[in-house]
Amino acid sequence: MPVAFLLAMQAAGMVIDWYGTNQQKQLSRLGTQIEQAGIESQIQMTRLEAEEASLAAMKKLRQTMGSQAAVFAARGTFGGAGSALALTTQSMTDFSSDERIRKINQQAKEANLRANSTMAGLHQLTYETQLGQAMRQRFFDKLPLSTLGGGDSGSGIFGKGGGSTGSAGAGAGRSFGMAQFTG
């Protein structure tokens, strides 16, 4: 009777441990989801900043081209030829170059944030794996494997004469994983 009671208590402890481990995993997953949402928010913020920078650059380009057109008109110069055209073309080329750099920077920031998101997912998987391994180790540590086999005397939790199926006698053991069982 005391052995059965102790085994029942160990089983209850294992169930509580399993429940606690699953709760830790769920809380960790929730934290990872919050972190993922934060990263997605940062990606959206990066896109918004890039769009605002593009809009500001477009406004500046329009002001520059408007100023150039006013200067050309005041000088009586035709804006579509010669040095006037070269200035307008240079302004457009500078804007295009700046716009490419802005897009490259935005993509680099997004790639960095997505890499952080992937790393967070990998950290979550590693954490869950470690929790599961620790729980399995605790389960195996709680199992009374030393008393299951009974050794040469044939006495264990199954009583004298071997395992639950056993008529093979004491000392005739078979290996099942980590324990040596007789039977």
Image (cartoon, rainbow, N blue to C red):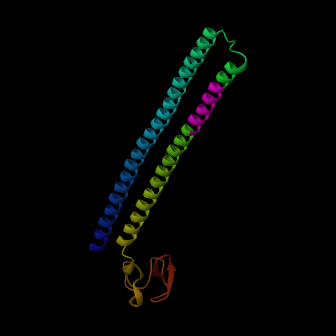
- Magenta span covers which residues? 90-104
In this view, the residue in front, 86 or 168, is 86
Taking 75 as reference, is 38 left or right?
A: left
| Residue located at (56% from left, 34% from top) | 102
Q: Nearer the viewer, residue 174 or 86?
A: 86
Q: Position of residue 40 (x, y in %)?
A: 48, 37
Does the magenta portion include 116?
no
Above or below, comparing residue 12 to residue 106 in the picture: below
Residue drawn at point x = 61 percent, y = 30 percent: 94
Q: Residue furthest right?
A: 81
Measured along the vertical axis of the image, is residue 100 above or below residue 26?
above
Main SS of the magenta part reads helix
In-image side of 161 versus 73 (left or right)? left
Direction front: furthest residue? 75
Q: Position of residue 47 (x, y in %)?
A: 52, 32
Does residue 136 lie above or below 116 as drawn? below
Does residue 21 appear left or right of residue 75 in this picture? left
Image x and y of residue 10, in percent: 32, 67
Residue sitting farthest toward the left: 2
User: Which of these two is toward me, 145 or 48?
Assistant: 48
Q: Quadrant of the N terminus?
A: bottom left
Residue 85, position as x, y percentages in the image: 69, 20
Tally of numbered tags? 0
Q: Residue drawn 39% across and 65% down?
A: 134
Q: Residue at x 56, y 15 (%)?
A: 67
